[in-house]
Image: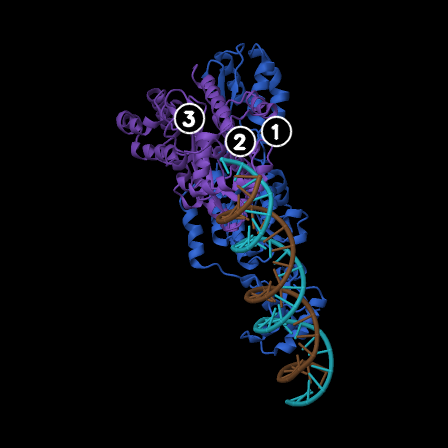
Chain colours: A blue, B purple, C cyan, D brown
Amino acid sequence: MLSKRQLQVLQVIIDEFITTAQPIGSRAISKKDDVSFSSATIRNEMADLEEMGFIEKTHSSSGRVPSEKGYRFYVDHLLSPFSLSNSELDVITHTFDEGMLEFERVVQKSAGILSDLTNYTSIILGPEVFETKLKQLQIISLTANSAVAILVTNTGHVEHRSFNVPNEINAVDLEKLVNILNDKLTGVPIIKLQDRLQTEIAALVKKYTKDFEAAYHYINGALFDENPVKLYVGGKTNILMQPEFKDIEKIRSLYSMMEQEELVANLLRPETDGIKVSIGQENKLDAMQGCSLITATYSIGDRQMGTLALLGPTRMEYSRVISLLNVLSKRLTTTFHSLYEKE
Amino acid sequence: MLSKRQLQVLQVIIDEFITTAQPIGSRAISKKDDVSFSSATIRNEMADLEEMGFIEKTHSSSGRVPSEKGYRFYVDHLLSPFSLSNSELDVITHTFDEGMLEFERVVQKSAGILSDLTNYTSIILGPEVFETKLKQLQIISLTANSAVAILVTNTGHVEHRSFNVPNEINAVDLEKLVNILNDKLTGVPIIKLQDRLQTEIAALVKKYTKDFEAAYHYINGALFDENPVKLYVGGKTNILMQPEFKDIEKIRSLYSMMEQEELVANLLRPETDGIKVSIGQENKLDAMQGCSLITATYSIGDRQMGTLALLGPTRMEYSRVISLLNVLSKRLTTTFHSLYEKE
DNA sequence: TTTAGCACTCAACAGATAAGAGTGCTAACA
DNA sequence: TGTTAGCACTCTTATCTGTTGAGTGCTAAA
């Protein structure tokens, strides 16, 4: 168990290190206004804290630096509540009051806000498509043998894809097909769409079109081989401004990690509601060593959940970031609620 | 005027420097198989070349490095024709034979090919929208007071935007409006769309809808405040692998330049057909110092032109890059030709 | 005209030295 | 018994020094 004084010392060390990125010495701590002990006393406490694994030395006679265990303790027990400044809140309010109506736009803007206000890199994972439903399907002919298929969901999301129309299929057939599809598929959750297309609809369609196989193949291909995960990243270059990432190799490994969307998506995939902090090694990925990831969930309706995340060095401004994520995740949830739930 | 031997020396220096990134000494040159002079002779020639400004020393007793003037001369007069390897050509052929039908997809893939085959950063500027025409306009209601407007062009490009539908406008009016718009606007070049909407259509629409102003405002806002330039970037992280960019500051300035889309678009905006090489200072931008930009144009139809570009250090593999851009720009042009011209 | 030879220059590296920050330990003090 | 002053010790950082090696420029000879 940590004594009150040890708690205070630990807090000062971490707070200070978070702002300066420099090892903290006993003298610096004893000079703090709310610390009333001599540097020698502090040194004794620091030796204890180090023994317990909360802080480390960078070399035998250096000041102390928080260990990952130290950060973990700090996040769990020492976080001072942080109030965002009015100007920060203004930025958020102002952005959301612009009346954006598209999921993409809202999320992209949010990623921008997060990275701008924190100087870390923000990553937003779009929601799982549990409840998104098909609103309408359209096929528009472009030339004699090409057309574009457009799929609109109840959330206003638009997916489109051009495809070749084989000569055997004429425009009339195509229209019939679309009508059938719309009839049968409107309101069906996107996630079940491919299934339904294959089972229920197939038989029906065969009656109407001469060459169902081809049509099915094309429509299916047109709409379903997209990458299902959507990641929105903001402030990728902010990483370059952190003093801990002055090594090009490190930067490269982080960037190449971020390019693997599936990997990042797994990192962010929400397990439970609320805020989650992963510090350094707690992230299993090699590229994430020395980094912390703070995630918050947001939701659209009851079951769809997405994730907001901020990626920075372990020396992150945890309390600020957590406050910000809290505010923004709530804001996102209410925004999406008002957009899509009243339909 | 340069002697034959000076040309040879310059060529060796630049070729060698492009592959090794190390200053080249007289001894190294004299050891080359097709060089039959002693290092002393080479040294004399190098002194002359330096006097003329084609090469430089990094310090008083270092080997020589090409100057920007040297690169310029090299590109203009010494470029050895370069044949792409079969495997490289295969990559291209294979990718294009997949039968991609959307502009976005083709271009995105092309950017990928360029950056993968060169290890530089590729940037592709989409075409000016001179001749793209409206194919169809759709408005699909989402909820009682929101809808998504979808605009499809003859090139299969889909643009969409959600917007608020004020209570005064009901679904029937909306449908009428869309019908009118489609009637009058199909086939109109996108670039003239906003004009036409304002002049011709306005009066007509007023008869049908109770509150034209609002409707117009929303439709207009829905479709036209998008950023008109489209940039497709590939291999952003390739920059990190160039030894000349080991300085984080340089990386940051390059990345932040690339984020300014308008700026980059101006850099790429095609002036004339064909390949253009800009070396170091020839690019006026500060961030581009030490970099070369090689651009090639491609076209869709007669007037639409876009640009392929590769961004790397001045020590670029000019001949390889130029060959590659040649091949790919032709390939893009024919691909788009066959996609959009036969309609 | 070409080349061998040589003195010279400079970067890069490895020690060496000094300054400074910070520690751990001991002994004295309240 | 907890706290603190004092001091020796450690390690980093910066600076300086000498050495090595690559490469040059110049001169004189072939």
Residue occupied by mark 3:
B274
The one nearer the camera, A194 or B265, is B265
Marks 1/2 same chain: no
Does residue A126 appear anywhere in the picture?
no
Give amino acid for label 2.
Leu
**Percent x, y of residue A5:** 64, 73
Q: Is residue A251 above or below residue A139?
A: below
Helix, strand or loop at label 2? It is: helix
Q: For residue B153, what is the image quadrant?
A: top left
Q: Left of B88 or right of it: where is B227?
A: left
Q: Position of residue B46 (x, y in %)?
A: 49, 41
Q: Residues within 10 Å of mark 1 (few under 14, many from 20)?
A: some
Chain containing the residue with disc 2: B
Label 3: few (<14), some (14–19) or many (≥20) C-alpha neighbours in 10 Å: some
Instruction: Check chain identity for marks 1 and 3: say if they share one.
Output: no
Residue placed most toward the observer, B276 or A162: B276
The residue shown at (58%, 11%) is A211
Which disc is residue B114 wearing?
Answer: 2
A340, B261: nearer the viewer? B261
Image mark 1: chain:
A
At label 1, the amino acid type is Lys
Give the chain letter at badge 3: B
Kind of residue indicated by mark 3:
Gly
- Quadrant of the frame with the C terminus of chain B: top left
Task: Estimate the x, y position of residue A73 in percent, counting from the top left.
Answer: 65, 62
Is B209 on the left-hand or right-hand side of A3? Answer: left
Spatial CA distance of label 1 from label 3 is 49 Å
The answer to whether A221 is drawn above or below residue B56 in the figure is: above
Q: Which residue is mark 1?
A: A192
Kindly indicate whether the residues beneath marks 2 and 3 are on one polypeptide chain.
yes
Please state which of the two labelled residues, at mark 2 or mark 3, is closer to the viewer.
Answer: 3
